[in-house]
Amino acid sequence: MSTTNTALASSGNAQLAAVTGGATAVADPTAVIAQVKAVQKIMAAVMKEGTHYGKIPGTPTDAPPSLFKPGSEVLLSAFKIAVEPQVTVTRDGNHITYEVHCIGRHIATGLVIGIGVGEASTAEDKYAWRAAVCQEEFDETPDDRRRVKWNKGKRGWNGAPDKPAWSVQQVRTNPADLANTVLKIAKKRAQIDLCLTGLAVSDIFTQDLEDLPAEYIDETGEVHQPEPKVKANNRYQERQKTGAPSENSTASGAISEGQVRLLKARAGGDAKLAELLTKYSVDAVENFPKAKVNEALDWLAGKGEKANG
């Protein structure tokens, strides 16, 4: 540990010891203020935004940043707090739930400075379901282990007035494959809770927002699902290579092999592909006009004026 880090850790230990000086002692306000200042010094000298803490995209601009697991480890280490996790496992059918209590013990004095709690389960939506890798996998999965999840478009997403609803085909995951991941998530949640409450820094950091998928957060705190990511400006058109122009170099030419594969993949099956070709009066996907690729892909995604045509 560097000289600067050692000094910060010593300062943190002194302030923490002052706060936990005895069972009947009343914390000195000066010591509490100094402890918060010590946290801020550690943030400035050691912690990096985006690695140890950071703003989650879509959260209110005036909300505190989220404390990440690496950041909690820096703070707990600086204040010489040992973490003692206690795990309770509950099984409900195939699903596994972990409840973790992280006891924070001050190494120098042995005093318990706080207990953080956290829970994670394989029954959580983001662990229980995954997107089907292909149409064949979805079709061959038993009915009770697959679903089509519809996601409601949200007003104001990316500055647009409305976004249409869209769906994704999902299949069940195997809980045993995720057990270790879910256990670590529960422990992380408990450890961050311990850090926030034990060091009284909830006003500096918030918690658990980084655990939420991006689709659950917007600037108003409401739940939404993001539309599929696309690139702006001819996002589906392949970049023109340098050298002599090819026969497909104009926007009105035939599409490339890559674009053929993309249209077939987005269609997800022969029936939808046939419907697309009929809508655009094309006899084969290989003859699809290059200038209409973006529009066709928007239609397949349920967007654009063609979606209602």
Image (spheres, rainbow, N blue to C red):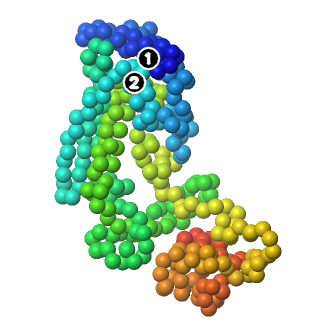
Q: Secondary structure at mark 2?
A: helix
Q: Point out residue 239 in the picture as x, y percentages from the top left corner.
A: 71, 67
- Which percent across, then down, holds residue 295? 65, 74
Residue at 60% from the left image edge and 89% from the top image edge? 284
User: Front-most of 309 and 301?
Assistant: 301
Res. 293 image quadrant: bottom right
Q: Are marks 2 and 1 in contact (CB under 8 Å)?
A: yes
Residue 61 higher or lower than 254, as above or below: above
Q: Closest to the observer: 48 or 215?
A: 48
Q: Residue at x 50, y 19 (%)?
A: 2
* Residue at point 32%, 64% (across, down): 172
| Residue identified by numbered label 2 | 77
On screen, residue 291 versus residue 8, left or right, reads right
* Left or right, 184 with reference to 243: left
Q: Mark 2: which amino acid?
A: Ser
Crowd class of label 1 (few under 14; some 14 to 19; many from 20; radius 10 Å): many
Q: Is residue 111 above or below residue 303?
A: above
Q: Earlier in the sequence, mark 2 or mark 1?
A: 1
Disc 1, SS: helix
Residue 276, percent across and down?
57, 83
Amino acid beneath label 1: Ala
Mark 2–mark 1 distance (CA, rounded to whole Å): 8 Å
Q: Position of residue 11 (x, y in %)?
A: 44, 12
Q: Is residue 149 visible?
A: no
Q: Is residue 118 above or below residue 293?
A: above
Q: Where's the C terminus, which quadrant?
A: bottom right
Please give the residue where the numbered disc 1 appears in the rendered image: 9
Question: 25 or 122, which is in the foreground?
Answer: 122
